[in-house]
Image: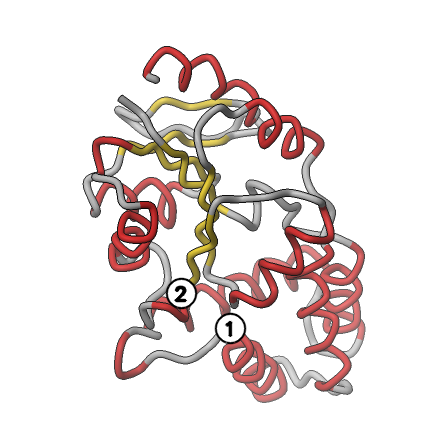
Amino acid sequence: MIKAVFLDYTGTIIEEGGPDGMEMLKRCYRNSDMESMEAMLAYWWKLIKNFEAVSYKDSYITEDEIVDRALEECARKIHLKENFEELHRLCQRFWMYAPAFPDSAEFFEKCRVPIYVISNNGLSYVEEGMRDKDLHPAGIICGDMVRAYKPHREIFQKALEVSGLGPEEVIHIGDSVTSDVAGAAAAGITALLLDRKGDKTCEGVTVIHSLTEAIPLLENQA
């Protein structure tokens, strides 16, 4: 019986772009050696994921520290010349105020079991993001709580601890095969892969194309 949903934040509840995030990356592109905006987007997200991958336990650094280090690397590698303080503030605003996907509010309204948000972003940013969008999760679990980012199983285990449930009693929904599906599986949690664009596959995993598509699946297992 499914008693709760664990829900990813960025890319699942909120859009990965948003005006603040895109403004930050446009400024990075315009004031660096990067050849295109598309290349800048790919370079930035790869940097963030690489820093997250090595940020674990004794080597853990916050998302704010990761942004600072990523900007420093941009200065060294692609000769970015910008106001780093302003770029960092834009990134923080992205974490809080990026638009929610149109189906997010409907999912929160119709889901009959508690929803717990799991995010690599800092707790204060996700809390403000939820207030901004008038969404009300039962709990928010972030990397800072366990000094580890997804897909490390510790963040999913923390969510189980907070919810008071076992792995067989929850379903995780997220848009990333590596962070969400693999991370949930490492903690023994069944995952649904959210694929709004219709270009993802993951063997043995149920793929949904909107959050609301998960509602009947949850009701069948409630």
Per the rendering, the mark at residue 63 is 1
- Residue 95's x, y, as percent? 64, 61
Quarter occupied by the N terminus: top left
Q: Nearer the viewer, residue 2 or 104?
A: 2
The residue drawn where x is 72% and y is 86% is 85
Q: Which residue is mark 2?
A: 143
- Residue 25's x, y, as percent? 72, 66
Q: In the rendered view, would you say 92 is above or below 208? A: below
Q: Nearer the viewer, residue 117 or 192?
A: 117
- Left or right? Give the position of 136 relative to 4: right
Secondary structure under the numbered disc 2 in the rendered image: helix
Give the amino acid at mark 1.
Glu
The residue drawn where x is 50% and y is 69% is 47
The image quarter in which residue 209 lies: top right
- Left or right? Give the position of 104 relative to 49: right
The residue drawn where x is 58% and y is 59% is 126
Tag in front: 1 or 2: 2
The residue drawn where x is 48% and y is 22% is 208
Q: Residues within 10 Å of mark 1 (few under 14, many from 20)?
A: many
Q: Earlier in the sequence, mark 1 or mark 2?
A: 1
The image quarter in which residue 40 lies: bottom right
Give the amino acid at mark 2.
Gly
Q: In the rendered view, would you say 199 is above or below 154? A: above
- Left or right? Give the position of 23 relative to 63: right
Secondary structure under the numbered disc 1 in the rendered image: helix
Query: Label 1, label 2: how many angstroms apart (C-alpha)?
Result: 9 Å
